[in-house]
Amino acid sequence: MTPTPRGIDNTTVIDMVVLAPKNEALEMIILQAKPWDGTAASVLKLQEKWQHYVGFAIHGGLERAYPKYARIPWRIVLDCISEPDDRTKEFIMRADEVTRKEGGSFIVRMQRPKGP
């Protein structure tokens, strides 16, 4: 059986959900395992993925999947291997504003380089 692809190329999948290290939030992780290219197409994919995540949270999917954590804050974390380009950063700022109005937040987290 082939694993389901994750990341912004698969806009209808929640890549990962984790409890933040200090249990202060439930984090829905968007994985971006390739460098940002600054194209409108990549921003559109991110926008579609973000919309799916926000919908999952505000329409009860997150609460149904993780009822034990229904009362703690939630956030969407864009987990990147490279810093987003300016076009993507602009979208992230606007998306964070909307996400906050819906009760969550949207942040970027840079992945640590792997190696010795």
Image (spheres, rainbow, N blue to C red):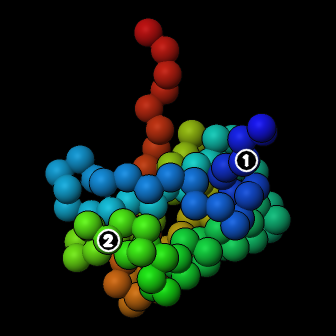
| Residue 116 on image: x %, y % | 44, 9
Q: Looking at the picture, does residue 35 appear above or below residue 73?
A: above
Q: Looking at the picture, does residue 107 appear above or below residue 91?
A: above
Q: Would residue 84 be visible to someone looking at this image?
A: yes
| Residue 74 on image: x %, y % | 34, 70
The residue lying at 57 percent from left, 54 percent from top is 15
The disc at residue 113 is none
Q: Quadrant of residue 45?
A: bottom right
Decide if residue 23 is on the left or right side of residue 105.
Answer: left
Q: Amino acid at mark 1?
A: Pro
In the picture of the structure, the residue carrying the numbered disc 1 is 5
* Of the two numbered discs 1 and 2 in the rendering, the one whose residue sits closer to the viewer: 2
The residue furthest top is: 116
Name the foreground residue: 20 vs 98: 20
The residue lying at 55 percent from left, 82 percent from top is 55
Name the foreground residue: 90 vs 111: 111
Decide if residue 42 is on the left or right side of residue 29.
Answer: right
Q: Amino acid at mark 2?
A: Pro
| Residue 38 on image: x %, y % | 74, 57
The residue furthest bottom is: 101
Name the foreground residue: 68 vs 57: 68
The residue lying at 72 percent from left, 41 percent from top is 3
Quarter in which the N terminus is drawn: top right
Secondary structure beneath disc 1?
A: loop
| Residue 83 on image: x %, y % | 55, 48
Q: Residues within 10 Å of mark 1 (few under 14, many from 20)?
A: few
Q: Would residue 108 be visible to someone looking at this image?
A: no
Decide if residue 3 is on the left or right side of residue 110.
Answer: right
**How many callouts does the rendering have?**
2
In the picture of the structure, the residue carrying the numbered disc 2 is 67
